[in-house]
Amino acid sequence: MSEKKKFELEFLLNTSPKVLENMLFTPSGLSEWFADDVNINDDIYTFFWNGSEEQARLLTKKMGEKIKWQNLNDEEEGLDTYFQLHYEIDPMTKSVILKVTDFAEDEEMEGTQQLWESLIEGLKRFIGA
């Protein structure tokens, strides 16, 4: 297996931080745009997509700023990887800037970035941003 490399994507959202927080920090919000369903048991999130599931450990949850997970498969392999949704308010425009940080292998990089772009487009449609 080749090494996973970090990447970051940035998206401008015309929404309120309160609306975005609900979509990022709650299982019901995440199940609207990120996964078909989301269950939480302690610090383990189970994400369901089309009959498959992935589990991730919650590493950081800071309201008003970010949420960060590590895929349990990566954790078991001792990889220093995570996926994070971080947002801030642009002081000039008052728009919300959402930054996605994730890791992917070289041969999966383009597809993983396209997946995130598609997911964020779905989020924008759902919140009207």
Image (cartoon, rainbow, N blue to C red):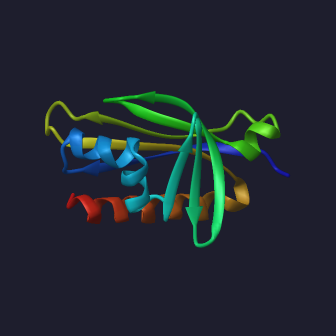
Name, please, the residue furthest toward the front: 41
**Along the horizontal axis of the image, is 67 left or right of 2?**
left
For this rendering, which residue is in front, 39 or 62? 39
Figure quadrant of residue 5: top right
Name, please, the residue furthest toward the bottom: 50
Residue 52 vertical position relative to residue 70 in the rendered view, above or below? below
- Which residue lies at the image location 76% right of the left edge and 46% below the top edge? 73
Residue 35 screen position, x and y as percent: 49, 61
Total label count? Answer: 0
Residue 33 vertical position relative to residue 84 in the rendered view, above or below? below
Name, please, the residue furthest toward the left: 93
Residue 98 screen position, x and y as percent: 35, 43
Residue 89 vertical position relative to residue 5 in the rendered view, above or below? above
- Which residue lies at the image location 65% right of the left edge and 49% below the top edge? 55
For this rendering, which residue is in front, 126 or 40? 40
**Along the horizontal axis of the image, is 120 left or right of 6?**
left
- Which residue lies at the image location 22% right of the left edge and 40% below the top edge? 18
Of the 4 image quadrants, the one containing the C terminus is bottom left
- Which residue lies at the image location 52% right of the left edge and 63% below the top edge? 115
